[in-house]
Amino acid sequence: MELLTINNVWMMICTALVFFMHLGFAFLEIGLTRQKNTLNILFKNIFIITIGLLLYCLVGFNLMYPGFGEGSSGFFGFAGFGLSSPLTDTGALDLAYNEGYTYWTDFLFQGMFAATAATIVSGAVAERMKILPFMIFAIVYVGFVYPIAGSWKWGGGFLDQLSTPFYDFAGSTLVHSVGGWAAVVAVCLLGARIGKFKDGKPQAIPGHNIPLATAGVLILWLGWFGFNGGSVLSADPTLTSLTLVTTCLAAAAGGVLAALVSTIMYKNLDLTMFLNGILGGLVGITAGADQMSPTDAILIGGIAGTLIVFAISLVDKLKLDDPVGAIAVHLICGIWGTLAVGIFGNLASVDQFISQLIGVGSYAIFCVTTSFIIIFTLKKTMGIRVDEKEELEGLDAHEHGMDAYPDFRLNEH
C-alpha cells in the first residue's frame, strides 16, 4: 500500500506538470506570433486540452491500450467505450502492468499527452487557418489517430513486438513526430501567410511578445520534468533522478549549440533560436532519457540544437511557413532523438537502430496519410484558409469579435 501511495503521488505530480505545459505552449505560440491573432491561438489551445480529455476518456484511452491478444495483428484494437477498470480494493491494476499506481492516474497522465500532438499543429498553422476546420481536425487527430499510433508501441502493438522492440521512452516519435508530420501536411495545404515570402525570399514576421515566448519555453522545460520523469511510470528514485538529469542536460546543450551555431551563421544573437534549441534538446532526449548517460544526453541535445538552426533554414527554403518552428523542433528533433536510441546509451546497436528506423517510417506513413485525408477533405468541403481581409486585420476581430489587448492596439500588417 505504501508503494502504491508513493508511486501514485509522484505520477499525479507529473500529471500536473504535463498539464502545466499547455500554458507553456500557449505562451510560446502567442509570443512568436502577432498580437492580432492572440485570442485565436489561446482559444485553440484551450479547446485542445478540454476536448482532448473528453475524447481520450470516451474512445482514445481504450484505442491506445486495447489489450492486444494472442493472434492480434498489433495494428488496431479497441477495448470499448468509456473508462472501466478491473479495480482492486485499492483502485490499482495488476502491479505487473503499472507498478502500483491507480487506473485513474494512468488515464489522466496519458490523457495529458494526447492533447499535445494537436497543440504542435496549432503553432504551425497559426495566423491563417479557420478555427472550425482546425477544431474538426483536432477532434479526429486527438480522438483517433494519436491513440492508434500510440498503441503500436505503448499499447503493446506491432512495434513493441519486433524481435528488437522499437523504443520510445516518452514520445520523441509517438507524441512529437506524430504532431510534426501533421504540421508539415497542414502547412503545405494551407500555404504561407501573406507577406512571408517576397520574390521567393523569406521575410521575418516578428512575434509580438518575446518575453511571453521565453516564459513559455521555461514553463515547457519545467513541464518536461513530468513529461519524462512521469514516463518512468513509478517513483523509482534511481530512474527518475537520472531521467531528470539527462532531460535537463539535453535542454541546456540544445540551447547553447543552437545559439552558437546561429550566431556563427547569421552574425546576431537570436533569442528565438536559443529558445527553440532548448525545445529541440528536450524533444531529442525524450525517446531515450532513461537509457542515456549525462554525456550521451549532452551530445544528443547538442546535435538537436544544431539541427534546429539548419532545419529552420530548410523549412524557409522549401517555402513552408511555420511561425513557431514546430516542424524543426518536434518533427526533425523527434526523428533525431528516436534514432539516437540506437546510437547512444544502453540500447545502442545495429538491430536497435534498424527498429528505430522502422518505427520512424511507420509513423511517417500513417501520420502523413491520415492528416492529409483529414485536412484535404476539410479544404475541399469547407475551406481551411481565412480570406485575405480576415488575415490582414486579424483572426481575433473576425473569428472572436474582440481583442486580446483592447487598450493597446498596434498597427499590424
Image (cartoon, rainbow, N blue to C red):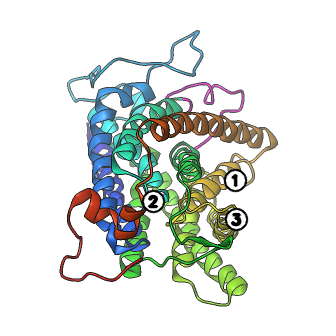
- Residues shaded magenta: 152-168
Q: For the residues marked 2 and 1, what is the alpha-carbon distance in whole angstroms?
A: 26 Å
Looking at the rendered image, the quarter that the C terminus falls into is: bottom left
Q: Is residue 234 visible?
A: no
Residue annotated with mark 3? 314
In the image, 347: left or right of 285? Answer: right
Residue occupying image coordinates x 26% and y 81%: 409
Q: Main secondary structure of the magenta part?
A: loop
Which of the two residues, 400 or 153, is positioned nearer the viewer here?
Answer: 400
Q: Amino acid at mark 2?
A: Gly
Which quadrant of the view contains residue 366? top right
Q: Amino acid at mark 3?
A: Leu
- Residue found at the far top of this picture: 71
When the figure is inspected, residue 196 is found, relative to residue 123, above or below; the finding is below
Q: For the residues marked 1 and 3, what is the alpha-carbon distance in whole angstroms?
A: 21 Å
Q: How far from the left and from the top, in percent, is residue 38?
A: 32, 67
In the image, 167: left or right of 375? Answer: right
Residue annotated with mark 2? 123
